[in-house]
Amino acid sequence: MTFKTIANGKAISIESIPHLSFNDFSEQATAIVTGGGKVVQFFAFQTEDAVRLICVLRTEELLVATCDAPERYPALTVDCEPFHMFEREIAEQYGIVPERHPWLKMVRYHANCRGVDDVFGNDYTEDIPGRYDYYSVAGDEIHEVAVGPVHAGVIEPGHFRFNCIGERVLNLEIQLGYQHRGAEDLLLKADRRRLPFIAENIAGDTSVGHSLCHAQALEALAGIQTDEGAKIIRTIGLELERIANHVGDLGALSGDVAFLPPANYCGRMRGDFLNMSLLLCGNRFGKGLVRPGGVRFPMNDDNRRDLTARISELKPQVKHVIDLLFSTSSVRSRFEGCGQVSRSDAERLGLVGPAGRACGIAYDVRRCFPTEQYNRLEIPENAEPTGDVYARAKVRADEIMQSIQIIESLLHNPVETHVIDMIEMTLAPDSLVVTLNEAWRGELSHCILTDAAGGILRYKVKDPSFHNWNGLSMSLRDTGISDFPLNNKSFNLSYCGFDL
């Protein structure tokens, strides 16, 4: 048996998934990824009589297989680096030891769900994720700089430990987990009517992305088809979320290099795009828009004309600010060559979204595994080769203009949809579904396994930040520590999306 091909957002029976021996599972998964494939999901789940591993990979298609989980096994990361974070997460969640893992440390600082001995020897009565022996460097003039977890301003908690020689960063180690909320456990145990609310609050700046992945998964398991109008509105909602966040990021980057005109303009325009989401569904962050079965709000002709007018007014303003930002020599001198990540490092780390495209990796879920209206839209490759702050900013700028064009094209004709609020669903028993969407940070995936009664056996969430935090760490290698804020803004990763 070999890995099985599956489709994005299509449910299959668990029985149809190849169940391999661990050796075959490990060899095939490693071969696929070393041959150019990528890890979408790799996690453990508990059946009635065993713990199993399941792996979802992507090449030009999605592939899946399972195996029984050994208590200890030779770490796949030794030969194939993209498994690195996934194996650490499995070790933490299920107490399964990946032997010879090159950097086995906790991910979110919590006890495993099986009640077996903790892999890391942590005492979880001490609710302090940072109590950990950080990587250290010794030598003359070597020093450490510790930042966080409490930061100035309205910033989520995370700890950054820099090993420096003078001002030059040798290594940055990042420890998160300070706000682990048990979102996956909530999605597993909560009343099904609460699930959409939990999903859209996994990461507040990605409410539409997470709620869309969740809705598509439940729709696939329940055999529900959404109408064309709902697909159009969902696509507009996701693109508005992308534009608002990218515009905000360009403004933040401008502020970090003390170029205030674009910072001020972008701050105002971000609010304008958030207000378009408000017009669409009554919430500036798109909460309440997407629900399993469709959308909760229609788009009448007045809404459509209003959105079209607002987009038309803002489009030249956005273009002007982007041109101003990238034509200013003082900005270019700070952006270019700062925080470079090579394409080979990006491939090994599995970077996704703008962080990956800035390193020359053209992958975009909207083009490669389209859902909603994306199979009817032309999504350009939009990759930059340099892997620096400039490239990460340029990718965002290009995507803003492309997303505006997408929304304009979807607003041409009247949109009719059957509005839903909450519908009763019966989920297919003993089934699996994997959903992928291109959220504004990159590949976002939800995976649901059901049991024999149609209940949710395992709910797995993977935010793009799960891949990309190590990219930020790599960007600081051999870079001045004073450039950390600029590099951090150029990635703008999610703490809560990672911490779950």
Image (tube, rainbow, N blue to C red):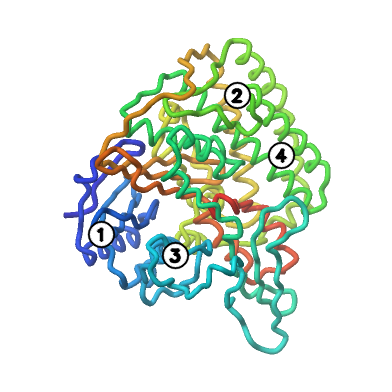
Q: Which mark is residue 322?
A: 4
Q: To which residue does mark 3 refer?
A: 92
Q: Amino acid at mark 4?
A: Ile
| Distance between the alpha carbons at the discs numbered 2 and 4 | 28 Å
Inspect this view and state whether residue 270 appears: yes
Q: Tags 3 and 4 in contact by the CB under 8 Å rule?
A: no
Q: Nearer the viewer, mark 1 or mark 4?
A: 1
**Disc 3 or disc 4, which is closer to the eye?**
3
Q: Residue 50 — which label?
A: 1
Q: Is residue 174 visible?
A: no
Of the numbered discs 2 and 4, the one sitting upstream in the chain is 2
Q: Is residue 476 above or below residue 206?
A: below
Looking at the picture, does residue 297 appear above or below residue 160? above
First in residue order: circle 1 vs circle 4: 1
- Gap between marks 3 and 1 measured at Cα: 17 Å
The reply to whether discs 3 and 1 touch (Cβ–Cβ < 8 Å) is no
Residue at image position (71%, 73%) is: 145
Please state which amino acid type lies under the numbered disc 2.
Cys
Residue holding disc 2: 281
Residue at point 48% right, 61% down?
Answer: 349
Judged from the image, the secondary structure of the residue bearing numbered disc 1 is loop
Single out the mark in the foreground, 2 or 4.
2
Residue type, mark 3 in image: Glu
Which residue is at the far front?
A: 125
Marks 3 and 4, how far apart in space?
43 Å
Q: Which of the two labelled residues, at mark 3 and mark 2, occupies the earlier sequence position?
A: 3
The residues bearing labels 3 and 2 have C-alpha atoms spaced at a distance of 39 Å
